Image (cartoon, rainbow, N blue to C red):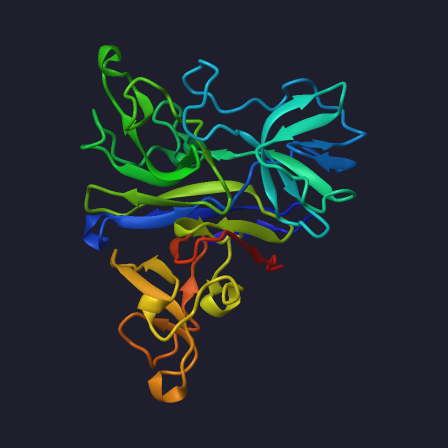
Amino acid sequence: MFAVSVSTSPVGFINLTIKGTDSGGMTAISAPMLPQVEYSGVIASAAGFEITDDSAVWSDDQYPVYDPDGDGTDYEQTAAYYVEITSGAEVGKTLGIYGSESASKKITVGEDVSGLDLVGASYSIRKYTTLGDVFGDDEDNTNGGFVLNKGSDFASADLIYKIGYKDGSAEWQKYYYQTAISVFGGNGWRSTKSKFIDVAGAPIKADEGLIVRRRTADDVSVTLPGTIKNNDSRTSLLSGFNLVAVSFPVSRKLTELNLTNDLTSGSDDAASDVIYVISDAGKFQKYYYQTAISVFGGTGWRVAGDKFTSQDDVEIKPGQAVIIRRRSDDQVDWSLGKPF
């Protein structure tokens, strides 16, 4: 269920249903509702890892990095705030923020922007949605009460999976809500890497997917309020597995995802890039874009095991995430127009 009020920056909410073991126990979800814009402006120059806004009024280090252990070094995903380009050739591009300077009116970002067409483009700054924003906290009953299973370790609690990147390599990051006395780690969100470090602030991008593994039979639901992206989106797809989502809280058919030019197509799923979708029964369905003459199934979206039946109208539901497996080594930027 989704509700929205029409305004310059649309606001609303989305209900995310998390399946219990009676329905397979695995759910791929996303967090397309965003925090409010904290700053907006126009880019005057961009070079190296810096962008400049001559009219900026931000302060030094106004947008600190995510540093849950407080030691000043990287832990998992470090950017807590990001720049999003909202007009021009690079619209939808997002850049994690790693520092801001008042006097120079510069922001340091997480990649080299020298080759991007950014001068004159408008941008906005937001804080990333966090793990605690989406699933709440047992201490304050965020989002209508804490509904996930807690536990003394990751083996007994519901698990949240996301794909992170450390030193250029993808890795599964696993989170759970811990209940324990202080000597055994205390209460709160934890990563499987440490029972003692609070990770409620772990950032979650609008186009990033999460997989929730529930350990009990019943389905539960969380309500996520926020604002809605008001410009086209852009998502980087890397070689291998990408856990991603549509950045808008609306349904999109496979034919409406604008992916056919970005994915490798072939005569069957073994020769094509594959989109894995978790069904309502908790099973992975494998979809691919097939190119073949009609006698061998024709061209269009297909499901693995059936070369002839069109799957063009299969829908990715609001708040649903998918896994895209890319076979080529290059990175592509998947662009998707806003649906309203």
* Quadrant position of residue 188: top left
* Residue 254 place in picture, x, y as percent: 45, 67
The quarter in which the C terminus is drawn is bottom right
What residue is drawn where x is 45% and y is 23%? 74
Residue 42, relative to residue 228: is it above or below? above
Q: Between residues 319 and 82, which one lies in front from this camera angle?
A: 82
Viewer-nearest residue: 282 or 20: 282
Height in image: 137 above or below 41?
Answer: above
Furthest-front residue in view? Answer: 329
Residue at point 65%, 39% (across, down)? 113
Q: Quadrant of the N terminus?
A: bottom left
Residue 226 percent coordinates (x, y): 54, 41
Q: Residue at the location (33% across, 68% down)?
A: 269
Number of residue marks = 0
87 horizontally vs 245: left or right:
right
Tell me if I can see residue 19 in this picture.
no
> Is 272 drawn above or below residue 136 in the view shown?
below
